[in-house]
Image (cartoon, helix red, strand yellow):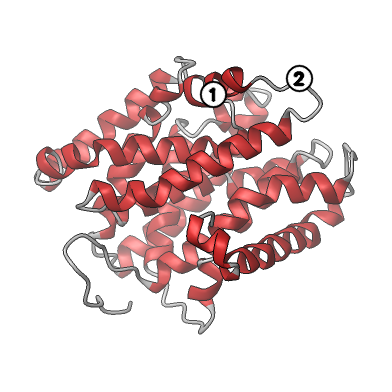
Amino acid sequence: MTSRSKTNSTKKPIYDWIYLARIIGSLAVVGLHLNTFIAASWLRWSLIASTIWAVPVFIMISGALMPKSLSRRLLRLLPLIFIWLPAYYIYSHQNQVFDFWQMLTKIFIYGEVGHLYFFLILVELAVITPIINKYILNLAGFKMVGLIGALALLGVFWNNRSPYAITFFIPYLSYYLLGNYLNQFKISTQVLLASKIGFGLSIISLLIAIWLFDGHGFLFRHSNPLIFTLAATGFMWLKATKFQFSKVKFVSNLTLGVYILHPILIDLVLNGQTQIPNSWLIPLTLLIFTACATITFLLKKNPLTARLGMV
């Protein structure tokens, strides 16, 4: 584990394992979306069960890096909201008559922006972060664990009942607090072993549940307790990783662009195909990830897009 770097009071230090987590999470997200193009089989369900924790772990990373300053995070998020959400909406409705006010309603009231709903969640969590910093983070460990458990249970019962974007964060609040809590938690050898066993058992349990309940939709929602356990144990496993690689930070800094761009690249590469051979999944995942990372690198180098904070 690397030591903390010197930072100001409003910025959390970032560790090598967080860079690695972003890369693995991004690969998992690309693989998850490509999974929808292979035939329903135990291979498909196994791959989904192994990677469906990716978005919750991104929320947990955001919690681990929870800022003291609301303005710092909002300044980073708002360009993403006002550039990419309309761009994605226009792209996905390109064959329909464009209506500006309908677009604003669909995006900001109902959150109809596909995978970019993630940004709406981050903004909502950022807005309530000052309250969390003031009233919640000082809770004793036992009380914090109880609160996280209660919020996770709320997520189960909430089950995406509200159609309004402003409530999207509710099932993810437990992940946000858990990421902050586990970031300060010492991962001993025993805890690491338990997290690895818990991760494996959660995948097996999820596969059994998919078989028993015929792939019921709730099983694939992030409020599913099995996915919560996957994310928590996977997070601890990553946190204990001693992985070191000179380019890990460089690649990690491109993963936001990978998350934003990959559905468009998948659409362009597959060109209308509705199914691909199983053997294509891993090569295509790596190809899409690399292509999106390359485009992101070019956008970061472009003075205009870099100034706009697009990626």
Would residue 209 be visible to someone looking at this image? Answer: yes
Mark 1 lies on a secondary structure that is helix
Vertical order, 122 against 66 (above or below) = above
Q: Residue at x 54, y 23 (%)?
A: 104
Vertical order, 269 against 104 (above or below) = below
Image coords of residue 72 (percent x, y)? 29, 53
N-terminal-most mark, 2 or 1: 2
Compare residues 1 and 292 and report the one nearer the observer.
292
**Number of numbered discs present?**
2
Image coords of residue 18 (percent x, y)? 41, 65
Q: Residue at x 45, y 30 (%)?
A: 223
Vertical order, 219 against 60 (above or below) = above
With 75 as the anchor, is 266 left or right in this view? Answer: right
With 37 as the anchor, is 137 left or right in this view? Answer: left
How crowded is the residue under tag 1: few (<14 C-alpha within 10 Å), some, or many (20+)?
some
Amino acid type, residue under disc 2 in the picture: Val
Mark 2 lies on a secondary structure that is loop
Q: Are marks 2 and 1 in contact (CB under 8 Å)?
A: no
Amino acid type, residue under disc 1 in the picture: Leu
Image coords of residue 74 (percent x, y)? 34, 46
Q: Residue at x 25, y 36 (%)?
A: 128
Residue, disc 1: 104
Would residue 231 be visible to someone looking at this image? Answer: no
Query: Which of the 4 image quarters holds residue 274?
Result: top right
Vertical order, 120 against 251 (above or below) = above
Compare residues 93 and 117 and report the one nearer the observer.
93
Q: Which mark is residue 270?
A: none
Compare residues 133 and 154 and report the one nearer the observer.
133
Q: Which mark is residue 97?
A: 2
Disc 2/disc 1 C-alpha distance (Å): 14 Å
